[in-house]
Amino acid sequence: MSRAINREEAMVPELELTVPEKAIGLLPIVLPILGTILLIMVRIQAGRPIGFIYSDALVMLALISYICAAVLLVTNIFVKENVLARLGLITVALGYCFNLTGWMIRWVEAGDKEGWKAGINGVWRYFPLDNLYALTLGFSAGAALTTLVVIRKPKYRALGAMSMPILVVVLALGMMLGSGISTLPPILDSYWRPIHVSIATIAYGVCLVSFGLAFAYLLKDGIRFEGVALWTALYGLLTFVMLGFGTASAFQVFRGQYTVSLAMDKSSLPLHAELPMVGPLMLLTLLVLVGAIALFALDHFNKDEKARTWGWRLFHGAVVLQAAVLLVLFFQMKSLDNPASRIPVREYPAFSVWMSEQSQQSVTPEQAQIWAQQNQSSLKLSMTSNPVEFGALIGLSVALFLVALFSWKREPLMSALPPLKTIDSLLYRTVGVAFPLLSLLLITGAVWANESWGRYWGWDSKEVGALVAWMAYAGFLHTRIAHGWRGRRSAYFALLGFALVIFTWLGVSFIIPGLHSYAGV
């Protein structure tokens, strides 16, 4: 009884808020939307891009704002300053405004590009969800909006440090997909398209924030940081294994080489150039991660303090090495001259087969090599050929850094996070919002599929991925409501659900072929 009274007393200040106070609390959400409307009106009135009011520039401004927000919110955990917390909220709101505006202005740009041709759905034909890049912009906007809803209250501000770094990785990866506007085939010109994919963007954004809340709960609940470091290192091992043995085989593990696809006239070619120093650094990082995994596993089973100490040393070394990988990788991407001279000889047999198929004439590997030398001035390194690789490397770098930072400053982190019951309640609410949205996603997708392809369900890879993700969040709610699951077990369900969402969003699009594959966009 006393617990119930205390809980009610704690809720009184929230319930007694006046209307003006409630309105002020909504300003971080309302002002970015008003700013978006104003910028779009200016763009429409001008009839052409002016200043920074065009999609690519706005998305870049959004990424810069999100990076600043992530830095400010993470720093505020360890340096308790109100100005940092407020600036963190402001930069999230600013980033959301730029993100939402850049996404919506693609609507205007797509219509201008095609001359606003009359489709069966009028202007909805150009709604900015034509490819994976546009979907990623919506995904990021949904995540930013959900983050704003949570952190607009000062007592929840620290939770933004969990979701914003992930949001930065998502938007950065999206920018690598290429911002070209695609023309949809007539079969997909349906009013269900904007409904279905808009629901997806909001649902995925809410799932991203629920992932951050689940991670925050585990940290607050006292999960061993060695366990977190072990799983992070295993993620790094999986990343390098996928790069080394995947379909692209960009990272030649045993050769210590890393190659990037070449492009001509903005079209990617099945031809790769080796980047100097990147491969050896990646191989060294892989070996260090393997060592850290072995030592953390030894500590887990035997409680070996010496193994734990050396495991952390190797983990910190992996942080530095992975940062060096990214620095050298992007430096080489921007500054490498004459990439055609870096093409390994082993690339030409497969490339000659591709050239033969394109030209309908037999092309030998020697002729393919001569062609590459003759066109070396036109060959450029392509960042859009397989953005999954770059996204995985960036995501690994962020994950390694945050785990190392949080393990180093454990006490300030624990004190900055809200109480366990508060985080658990917020996690339940976000999943409670995400699940019906994912349900609507499946329903509207089935209706759209029936209208376009004459069937509601075809077991396409994306459909199956969305269904499995939905089942994970259904499991979260079922176990919580029917069996009373709370705390860590629910948090693990939320982590699994978002992992499946990421695989559905990106992995299916580039790894598993299907009707929803965007690998060629």
Image (tube, rainbow, N blue to C red):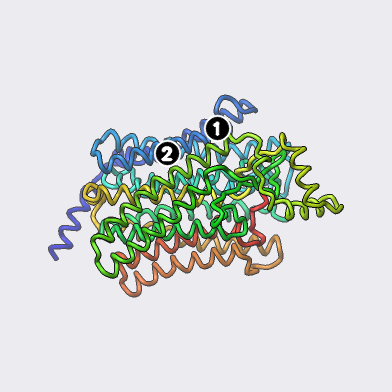
Locate residue 207 relative to residue 17 in the image: left or right. Answer: right
Could you tell me which residue is drawn at 46 percent across and 59 percent down?
Answer: 237
Reading the image, the residue beneath label 2 is 67
Three-letter amino acid code at disc 1? Ala
In this view, the residue farthest toward the left is 2
Locate residue 397 relative to residue 443 in the image: left or right. Answer: left
Three-letter amino acid code at disc 2? Ile
Q: Please state which of residues 173 and 497 is positioned toward the viewer in this rendering.
A: 173
Measured as percent of width and height from the top left, residue 376 is found at 72, 37
Measured as percent of width and height from the top left, residue 79 is found at 25, 38
Locate residue 3 relative to residue 513 in the image: left or right. Answer: left
Reading the image, the residue beneath label 1 is 57
Q: Please state which of residues 172 and 243 is positioned toward the viewer in this rendering.
A: 243
Residue 82: name its quadrant: top left
Measured as percent of width and height from the top left, residue 3 is found at 15, 62
In this view, the residue farthest toward the right is 361
Q: Would you call the spot at circle 2 few (<14 residues within 10 Å), some (14-19), or many (20 or more)?
A: many
Q: Is residue 243 visible?
A: no
**Label 2: element kind:** helix
